[in-house]
Amino acid sequence: MRKRTNLVRQMLGVICLALFSGGLMAWAAGEPAAKDDIVVALKDKVIRNLSSSGLTLAFHIGLTNPSSAPRELVRYRYRVTINQREFLNMTVSLDEPLPVPPDGETLIALPVKISYDLLFAAMGPVEGQALCDIVGDMFFQNERKKEQRAPFAFSGEFPIFQDPEIEVLPLKVNDLTVGGADVVFRPRFRNPNGYELIVDKISFALFFGGREVLSGQIPEDKSLPRTGEKTFSLPFLLDFFEAGEKMREDFQKDEIPCRFAGEIEVMSVWGRLLIHFDKTQGLRFEKTP
C-alpha cells in the first residue's frame, strides 16, 4: 500500500494549498453548515501549464468565515480519483496555519499536477479527456483551539493533449540549373487530438546540409482539424553561388540532409500553447520532367 501511495504521489505531484487572489461564481459543497461554520465554496477551475507531458488542474476556492472570531486552517485530508479510480488518500498538516479572518472571504488555490506518463502507467491509455474528483475535509481552529470540520467535494475535467505530428514530403524541384534551383518545400502537420487546434502562428527555419535556406512564418489558414492534417507549400529560389558548391553537389544526389525546426502557437480555451518542433531527415527530391 505504501509503495502504491508513493507512486501516486509522483503521478499527481504535490497537492498543496496556496494563497490566490480573484474569484467568480460560488458553489458550496458538502454537508449543510452551522451558522458560524466555515463555508468552503468552489469559485473557478483553471487548466495551467498544458503540454503534451501533462498539466495542472487548479481549483480556486473561497473560505467564508461568518463568525465574529478569527479561524485558522490547520490541516486537511482528501481523496483524489481520476475516472472514478482512487489514486490518492492522505492527510496533510500545515506547517504554518492559514488565517481566515471573520466577516469575509479568504481565497486559496488547490492545484493538482498531473503527469501523462505516470497517469498512463497507472491507468493504461486515456483518450480525449479525463475526470478528476477531489473529496475531503478542511479543519479549522478558533482562538480557544476548538476544532471545526468543513467538508468539500470538487470535480473537474482535463484534456489529454498531444503535440501535432510533422511529416516532410519530398522536395519538389521545378527547375534545376548550374546557378540554382526553383523548389517547393512541403511540410505536413497532423493533429492527433479529437478537437480542432486553432493555430495562430507557425514560425520556422529550414536547413539543407546544415545551412539555413529559408525562415519565416507559414502563411494561409494554419488551423488543424480534429484528427486531421494540412499540407503547406513553401516555394523559394535557391542560389548555389551563395549557398556554396556543396549545395550544388547535394542536389545531384538522391536526397539532401534536411532540418525543419520552429514553434507552433495555438490559441485554446486553456490559454496560449507554444509547441516546439525539430525534425531532421534525409529529404528526397521530386524532380519535374
Image: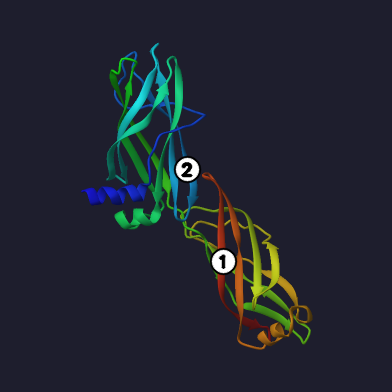
Q: Is residue 62 above or below residue 129?
A: above
Query: Which of pointers 1 and 2 lies earlier in the amino acid sequence?
Result: 2
Find the distance from the CA under tag 1 to the CA under tag 2.
26 Å
Q: Callout 1: 10 Å neighbours few (<14), some, many (20+)? A: few
Q: Amino acid at mark 2?
A: Ile
**For the view shown, which residue lies furthest in the top direction?**
68
Labelled disc at residue 47: 2
Residue under pointer 1: 278
Q: Position of residue 232 (x, y in %)?
A: 63, 66
Q: At x 43% / y 18%, what residue is drawn? A: 101
Q: At x 56% / y 63%, what residue is drawn? A: 277
At mark 2, the secondary structure is: strand
Q: Is residue 105 above or below residue 87?
A: above
Q: Position of residue 264 (x, y in %)?
A: 59, 57
In which quadrant of the rendered view does residue 60 lie? top left
In the displayed structure image, the side of residue 238 where residue 94 appears, left or right: left
Tell us which disc is closer to us: 1 or 2. 1
Q: Callout 2: 10 Å neighbours few (<14), some, many (20+)? A: many
Q: Position of residue 76 (x, y in %)?
A: 32, 31
Q: Amino acid at mark 1?
A: Asp
In the displayed structure image, the side of residue 1 where residue 10 appears, left or right: right
Q: Nearer the viewer, residue 150 or 195?
A: 150
Labelled disc at residue 255: none
At mark 1, the secondary structure is: strand
- Number of marks: 2
**For the view shown, which residue lies furthest in the left direction?**
1
Quarter placement of the C terminus: bottom right
Q: At x 36% / y 44%, what residue is drawn? A: 131
Q: Position of residue 203 (x, y in %)?
A: 65, 60
**For the view shown, which residue lies furthest in the front direction?**
95
In which quadrant of the rendered view does residue 230 lie? bottom right
